[in-house]
Amino acid sequence: MPANLPPGLPIVPDGDAPGGQRISSPLPGPGSGGPGIGADAAAASTVPFSMSPEDFEAAVSDALLLIPDKAARAMDNVAIFIEDDYIPQPGDEPDTVLLGLYEGVPLTERDSWWDAGSLPDRITIFRQPILDICGSRQEVIDEVAITVIHEIAHHFGIGDDRLHELGWG
């Protein structure tokens, strides 16, 4: 996947790194207590890390390579986007901070009529909130991976409570 796409264009998981190698990362495992998704994560660090949009996009692309091949092939009609920040919607708390957002119909809730004209599910990864809670390049890479996997898990119908139990909160 080229890392020079402009921010906002969809990134589609292809399952393999160049040369067919899988990429691994020292991500927090279950019970690690790592930063979570949402407002609590914003308090985890006070010194934001600076990273170019291109490097951030590369981190998102690398995170997609962490998805097991079988899961990547099972993803259906979903696009992944990068945006600078989440803008709270009407009804949201004005101070809402999100690292990622899944919008769509999880695979577990789709019926036989779902495919008829349905728009793709949308996963958005928010760059600035992630940079705001990270103090190093490795922290950004790890938080991007956690956020990408967290949002993809929602596509598969896994809720926040279960993700927190598994250490992917």
Image (spheres, rainbow, N blue to C red):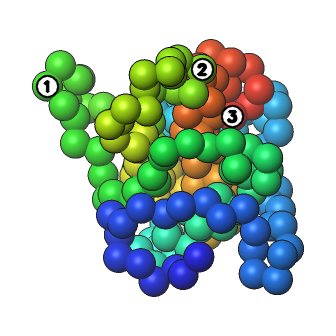
Q: Which residue is mark 3?
A: 168
Q: Which residue is mark 1?
A: 90
Q: Residue furthest left?
A: 90
Residue 51 coordinates in the image, percent (x, y):
47, 74
Q: CA distance from mark 3 to mark 1?
A: 28 Å
Residue 25 coordinates in the image, percent (x, y):
80, 60
N-terminal of the pair, mark 3 or mark 1, is 1
Residue 117, by quadrant, is: top left
- Residue drawn at 18 percent across, 19 percent down: 91
Secondary structure at numbered mark 1: loop
Amino acid at dot 3: Trp
Q: Which residue is mark 2?
A: 108
Asked whether, in this view, residue 31 is left or right of residue 75, the answer is right
Query: Depth check: 165 or 43 in front?
Result: 165
Secondary structure at numbered mark 2: helix
Amino acid at dot 2: Thr
Residue 83, by quadrant, is: bottom left
Whether residue 4 appears in this view of the structure is yes
Q: CA distance from mark 3 to mark 2?
A: 19 Å
Query: Depth check: 164 or 9 in front?
Result: 9
Q: CA distance from mark 1 to mark 2?
A: 28 Å
Give the vertical position of 60 relative to 122 (above or below).
Answer: below
- Assess whether mark 1 and mark 3 are in contact (beta carbons under 8 angstroms): no
